Amino acid sequence: MPTWGLVVETTVGTGDRKHIEAAVAAQVEGSRDDALAELERRARAFVPTHPMSPKRRRLYRQTDGFLLVVEGAWQTFSTRFTVAELLADSAAP
């Protein structure tokens, strides 16, 4: 049974220091559809650090996950949620 990584890439910082950071939020064993369902649940519930005063929130479905775009008073921030099959893990038991 494959293992799927739920990868979250989000905008951090503001102004000239704004950049993207990625992290594996969780791993799911099972089908790709199972992993996408869990990823969608997490994307819908996700509350980003920025912007502090969100004005508009839009969640888009993509082939391999979701894209969350949150507009603030001064800047727009995005978070990409991707499902990816784990092929190798150097820290595996």
Image (cartoon, rainbow, N blue to C red):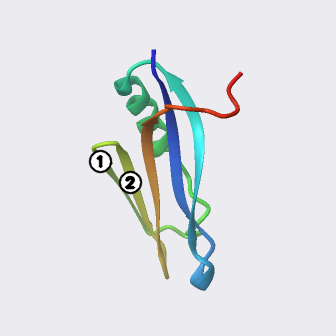
Give the number of the disc on residue 39: none
Indicate the quadrant where residue 40 lies. top left
Indicate the quadrant where residue 14 lies. bottom right
For marks 2 and 1 on the same chain, the one whose residue lies earlier in the sequence: 1
What separation in Å lies between label 2 and label 1 (alpha carbons)?
7 Å
User: Residue at coordinates 51% horizontally, 44% vertically from top-left?
Assistant: 7
Q: Say how many tags the image has.
A: 2
Q: Circle 1 sits in a helix, a strand or a loop, which is it?
A: strand
Please state the horizontal and vertical placement of residue 25, each as a whole percent of the image.
59, 40
Residue lying at the far bottom of the rendered structure: 16
Q: In this view of the protein, which residue sits in the foreground, 24 or 75?
A: 24
Q: Is residue 92 above or below residue 77?
A: above
User: Residue at coordinates 44% horizontally, 54% vertically from top-left?
Assistant: 80
Please state the horizontal and vertical placement of residue 69, each as a whole percent of the image.
40, 62
What's the residue type where badge 2 is placed? Answer: Leu
Considering the image in quadrants, where does the C terminus appear? top right
Please state the horizontal and vertical placement of residue 52, each as a whole percent of the image.
60, 69
Q: Is residue 89 above or below residue 50?
A: above
Q: Which residue is mark 1?
A: 62
Residue lying at the far top of the rendered structure: 1
Q: Is residue 65 above or below residue 11?
A: above
Considering the image in quadrants, where does the N terminus appear? top left
Q: In this view of the protein, which residue sits in the foreground, 12 or 7?
A: 7
Q: Residues within 10 Å of mark 1 (few under 14, many from 20)?
A: few
Q: Are marks 2 and 1 in contact (CB under 8 Å)?
A: yes
What's the residue type where badge 1 is placed? Answer: Gln
User: Residue at coordinates 48% horizontally, 73% vertically from top-left?
Assistant: 72
User: Residue at coordinates 34% horizontally, 42% vertically from top-left?
Assistant: 64
Q: Which residue is mark 2?
A: 67
Please state the horizontal and vertical placement of residue 35, each as a whole percent of the image.
43, 29
